[in-house]
């Protein structure tokens, strides 16, 4: 109350040049409301903190306590990063998703190599071609293809390697990885492993 009154008095001195009488009346009314409103108890604060924690958990893509959350429908709630996945193999290639559904490696950056990496679960991401509007997906044979809609085959584990590069393993088909050959062709995911440089990607701006 004292702080609110001092603020009101301070602003009233400058009212001749900057404030009008109606505004001062409103400020006085607000100061009375603030002074009369009780401060929340610590218990209420704890409850609010839990609510905010729940909201934050959902916003960063971490699973909630309910096991039946449908990430296929709610994946957009996760963190999104616009990156280009660079593989330092051969002359160096960026993963690109073309409008016709072809996925390949390209040396120079272009609009089709810009990907949106979205968190859909803890440690699980999706790759979306910003320009082509297609998702990167992998089938049971380890072959990459472009999907117009998000599905389970669009989920990948983002694994941070000891050399600070990332490897991307199919969530649905364990042991199948995204990889680019030294000629820029997509490798069959079931024939490669993180021990091979073809699976090492550096997310770049």
Image (cartoon, rainbow, N blue to C red):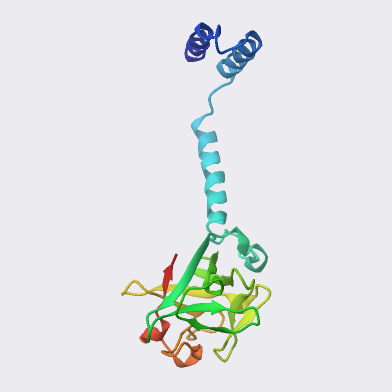
Q: Quadrant of the C terminus?
A: bottom left
> Can you tell which quarter of the image residue 133 is in?
bottom right
Q: In the displayed structure, does residue 51 sit left or right of residue 165?
A: right
Residue toward you, 24 or 141: 24
Instruction: Give the image location of residue 84, x and y in percent.
Output: 47, 71
Asked if residue 128 is positioned above or below residue 35 in the image, the reply reads below
Residue toward you, 132 or 125: 132
Instruction: Give the image location of residue 151, x and y in percent.
Output: 65, 75
Asked if residue 74 is positioned above or below residue 45 in the image, the reply reads below
Q: In the displayed structure, does residue 15 sit left or right of residue 134?
A: left
The total number of labels drawn is 0
Instruction: Give the image location of residue 165, x and y in percent.
Output: 37, 74
Residue toward you, 114 or 177: 114
The answer to whether any part of residue 12 appears in the image is yes
Asked if residue 152 is positioned above or below residue 35 in the image, the reply reads below
Q: Residue at x 50, y 6 (%)?
A: 13
Q: Residue at x 57, y 81 (%)?
A: 172
The answer to whether any part of residue 171 appears in the image is no
Instruction: Give the image location of residue 134, x and y in percent.
Output: 63, 74
Asked if residue 176 is positioned above or below residue 117 in the image, the reply reads below
């Amino acid at each position: 109350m004292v702080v609110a009154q001092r603020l009101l008095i301070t602003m009233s001195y400058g009212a001749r040049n900057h404030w009008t009488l109606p505004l001062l009346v409103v400020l006085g009314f607000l100061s009375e409301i603030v002074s009369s409103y009780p401060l929340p108890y610590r218990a209420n604060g704890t409850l609010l903190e839990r609510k905010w924690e729940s909201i934050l958990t959902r916003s960063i893509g971490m699973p909630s306590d309910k096991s039946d959350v449908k990430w296929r429908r709610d994946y957009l709630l996760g963190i999104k990063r616009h990156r280009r996945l660079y593989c330092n193999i051969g002359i160096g290639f960026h993963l690109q998703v073309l409008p016709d559904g072809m996925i390949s490696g390209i040396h120079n950056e272009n609009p089709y190599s810009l990907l949106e990496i979205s968190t859909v679960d803890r440690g699980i991401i999706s790759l979306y071609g910003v320009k082509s509007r297609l998702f990167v997906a992998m089938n049971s044979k380890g072959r990459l293809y472009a999907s117009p809609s998000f599905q389970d085959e669009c989920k990948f584990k983002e694994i941070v390697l000891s050399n600070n590069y990332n490897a991307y393993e199919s969530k649905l088909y364990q042991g199948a990885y995204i990889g680019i050959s030294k000629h820029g062709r997509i490798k069959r995911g079931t024939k490669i492993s993180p021990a091979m440089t073809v699976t090492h990607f550096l997310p770049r701006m």
